Amino acid sequence: MQGKLTGEGEFDLGDGNSYKGRFKDNLEDGRGFRLFSDGSTYTGTWKQGLQHGRGLFVSQDKQLTYEGGFEEGKRCGKGVEMVNGVSKREGEWCDDMLNGNGVFI
């Protein structure tokens, strides 16, 4: 596939969005780090340009973190969300929502 980003690299969109990590066919694919234009970050695995697998999301103000599973860009599987370093939600996530039994601290 000539002309497409594949393998290790860095990409800066110039609008505050940047990515460093693995690419496949011009998309984030594999392990990488993304800085979003609002200042939030994601470090973890990607598949076809979406967060997929295990990763860590940190909001721009560091008040919200989520570490755990992702599927097609949404929280999915086991994970822990922390808000303001005080409130903790832990359990199984599905479609970006805590699903079923979870632990709230």
Image (spheres, grey):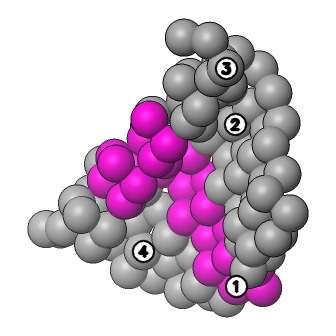
Look at the numbered disc 1 and give the secondary structure of its residue. Answer: loop
- Residue in the image at 67% along x and 20% along y: 3
Q: Which mark is residue 3?
A: 3
Question: Along the line of sight, which residue is nearer the eye, 18 or 46?
Answer: 18
Mark closer to the chain start, 2 or 3: 3
What amino acid type should be assigned to the residue bearing mark 1? Gln
Mark closer to the chain start, 1 or 4: 1
Question: What is the spatial separation of the Cα atoms under label 1 and label 3, in whole angstroms?
Answer: 40 Å
Q: Which mark is residue 63?
A: 1
Q: Which mark is residue 32?
A: 2
Characterize the local packing of mark 1: few (<14), some (14-19) or many (20 or more) Cα atoms within 10 angstroms: few
**Residue 100 image offset from top left, x and y in percent:** 13, 68
Question: What is the spatial separation of the Cα atoms under label 1 and label 4, in whole angstroms?
Answer: 14 Å
Q: Is residue 103 magenta?
A: no
Q: Which residue is mark 4?
A: 89
What amino acid type should be assigned to the residue bearing mark 2? Gly
Viewer-nearest of discs 2 and 4: 2
Vertical arrangement, residue 81 with respect to residue 33, above or below? below
**Residue 35 image offset from top left, x and y in percent:** 77, 60
Q: Is residue 98 left or right of residue 47?
A: left
